[in-house]
Amino acid sequence: MSDSSLKFPDGFLWGAATSHFQVEGHPKEIASRLSDWALWTNEAGRISDSTSADQACQFYHRYEDDIVLIRDMNLNAFRLSFNWPALLQDPPGTRAGPSLLDQKQVDYYRRILTSLKESGVTTFATLFHFTLPDWLAAAGGWTTAYAVSEFKRFSELIVAEFSELVDYWITINEPLAYVYQSYVAGLWPPGIKSDYLSAFKAVRRLLEGHAAAYDAIKAVKPDAQVSYTLHWRPFMPKNPLNPLDHMVRFYRDFTFNQLFSSSLESGEVKFPFPINLNKEIISISGPVEGLKGKCDYLAINYYTRELSRFRPSWPIDIFGESSPERELAVNDIGWEVYPQGLYDLLTGDTLAYQFNLDGSRRPVIITENGYASSFAADLDQGDWSLADQKRVDYLLTHLREIHRAIAAGVDVRGYLHWSLLDNFEWAEGLKARFGLIRVSYPTQERILRASAKVYAEIAKNNAI
């Protein structure tokens, strides 16, 4: 380590992140436990590369080997998610037996979490990472109060089983990304387009779900660390001289960056003019019981920025669109590489949410950050994808911005790279490769990329 190295605070968490649907696959043990996503991916035309998550990384059967790789990379933190559809597969009224949870799935997660703890790895666990039981999705999913009550019950059951094995809890992953893709873009189940009312209804229910899950966790373990993740990004007008682009930037920033967090801090859902004039919007505005301030640390997912622009239409769409034009280098799914945006968010837009109601400072964890490469799905052309210099550059430049934010006084305590493994990347399928570790899907062979080796040295030295 040179004298010019940037040292991180003692105890800093160096980790990687995954989610169950993206890595586990669908082995016979859970083949009948259908989620909305399992059904969705097997409908023709839903996934851009026509792949599915049926195999993915087979983490369900290979987790022991993957935990060895976590140790080999000197990582001291790991994020996973619980498979709600597999753990609680039956609708209310049809559940039987001594436990409402499926015991085989409980044992599976207990083995993983125990192995991680025995390896000295700090554990992060997400309760909702985009997948719903099929019966709950069919009943309206997160647009209904039913989803809130079911999520509360699921949270209570999970924390009762795993409270001593989870260090950091995440109730809901990227709620605004979820509602946008599901009810506005229509790229995720249920595949509804341009239904802003359903999207905002779902936001309210997700806030209620967060409050319910937070209380469920705290009831069992009062000192638990509980948060939610948000996909933060800087929004900028495509044309700085166009006031309509500035208008769109304001409403998109409010919706994606501010709505969930500001509602949680104030304890009530508020919409700006003219959204707040809509009668149905008024009905979902207002206080959310038991919500105010329920966040113990700030969990930030960061990948890129957005250039927002006005789109001529009638009636006028104040949300406009994300400009498809790019001004910076991009990753292989078209996201601009903008490291400075992470520093700007840490020292700017998120600053208001880095404090508890009593004025004490909330710690910050970067819970996702990563670079997408794109290769042939079967990777039968050799191992040229292992020399991933663009991912190395992405990693180093973003870590420098985090270090700069720490020097400016932001209490960042950890960084979880997305992702540990190549995985199923939702609507993009298997083609988008985010892994520090390359997965050859036909053989399931794991090989550390150059970025994994660089990251291992960073974690070992606690410095870049």
Image (cartoon, helix red, strand yellow):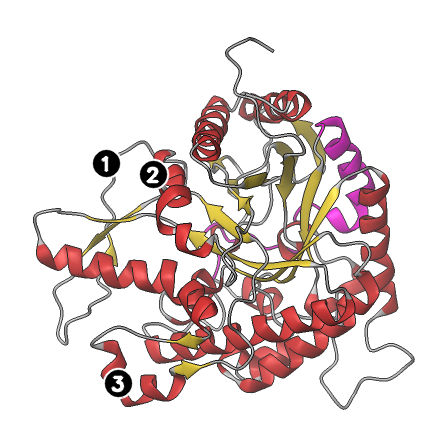
Q: Which residue is mark 3?
A: 278
Numbered-mark total: 3
Q: Is residue 310 in sight in this rendering?
A: no
Q: Amino acid at mark 1?
A: Glu
Is 254 left, or right, of 149 in this rendering? Answer: left
Disc 1: which residue:
327
Point out the frontmost of discs 3 and 2. 3
Q: Earlier in the sequence, mark 1 or mark 2?
A: 1
Q: Name the residue at 80% across, 61% down.
A: 162
Which residues fall within the magenta stretch? Answer: 45-74
Q: Quadrant of residue 42?
A: bottom right
The N terminus lies in quadrant: top right
- Label 2 packing within 10 angstroms: few (<14), some (14-19), many (20+): some
User: In 3D space, how far apart are the residues under numbered discs 3 and 2 (Cα atoms)?
Assistant: 35 Å
Mark 3 or mark 2: whose residue is earlier in sequence: 3
Let me know if residue 59 is in the magenta part: yes
Question: Disc 1 vs disc 2: Cβ atoms closer than 8 Å?
Answer: yes
Q: Quadrant of residue 214?
A: bottom right
> Which residue is label 2 attached to?
336
Give the quarter of the image for residue 33.
Answer: bottom right
User: Which residue is found at the position 46% from the left and 30% from the top?
Assistant: 407
Q: Percent x, y for residue 8?
A: 57, 27
